[in-house]
């Protein structure tokens, strides 16, 4: 069998399930474990891949942990200075 993932409108779900039931010798609906734990799994996966691609092609800089912490400390200092009045 070939596996395909499809997205359907909630209003169409009953029709699709009836179609699959009528053609059960050729197809079946299989639960996706990833979606059982996280309904936004594939959206997050796509976003993460775009971020990785942006880092790989130089559009985005990946900071080391020390660099990131130093930058956050500077931001915190600026916010404290600005809003401490």
Image (cartoon, grey):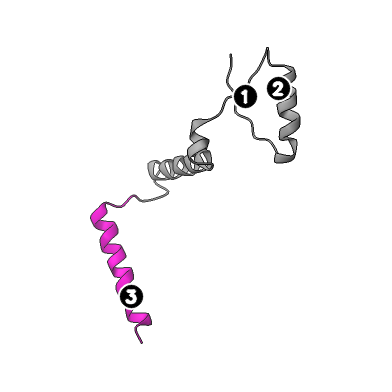
Horizontal side of 3 relative to 26 (left or right) equals left
User: Residue 78 got which mark?
Assistant: 3
- Residue at the extreme left: 66
Looking at the rendered image, the disc whose residue lies closer to the viewer, 2 or 3, is: 2
**Viewer-proximal residue, 24 or 85?**
24
Q: Earlier in the sequence, mark 2 or mark 3?
A: 2
Q: Magenta part mainly helix, strand or loop?
A: helix
Membership of 38 in magenta stretch: no
User: Residue 20 got which mark?
Assistant: 2
Instruction: Check contact, mark 2 vs mark 1: CB within 8 A.
Output: yes
**Viewer-proximal residue, 52 or 29?**
29
- Label 2 packing within 10 angstroms: few (<14), some (14-19), many (20+): some
Horizontal side of 48 relative to 11 (left or right) equals left
- Label 1 packing within 10 angstroms: few (<14), some (14-19), many (20+): few
Residue 28 pos. (x, y %)? 63, 20
User: In the rendered image of this protein, does residue 81 appear above or below residue 72?
Assistant: below
Between the C-alphas of marks 2 and 1, the distance is: 7 Å
Q: Residue at x 49, y 41 (%)?
A: 38
User: Residue 29 got which mark?
Assistant: 1
Residue range corresponding to the magenta coloring: 62-85
Residue 80 pos. (x, y %)? 33, 78
Q: Quadrant of the C terminus?
A: bottom left
The image quadrant that residue 10 belongs to is top right
Residue 63 pos. (x, y %)? 30, 52
Between the C-alphas of marks 1 and 3, the distance is: 54 Å
């Amino acid at each position: 069998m070939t596996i395909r993932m499809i997205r359907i409108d909630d209003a169409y779900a009953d029709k699709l399930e009836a179609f699959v039931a009528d053609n059960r010798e050729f197809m079946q609906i299989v639960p996706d474990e990833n979606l059982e734990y996280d309904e936004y799994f594939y959206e997050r996966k796509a976003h993460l891949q775009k971020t990785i691609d942006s880092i790989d092609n130089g559009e985005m800089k990946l900071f080391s942990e020390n660099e990131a912490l130093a930058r956050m400390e500077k931001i915190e200092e600026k916010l404290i200075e600005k809003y401490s009045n």
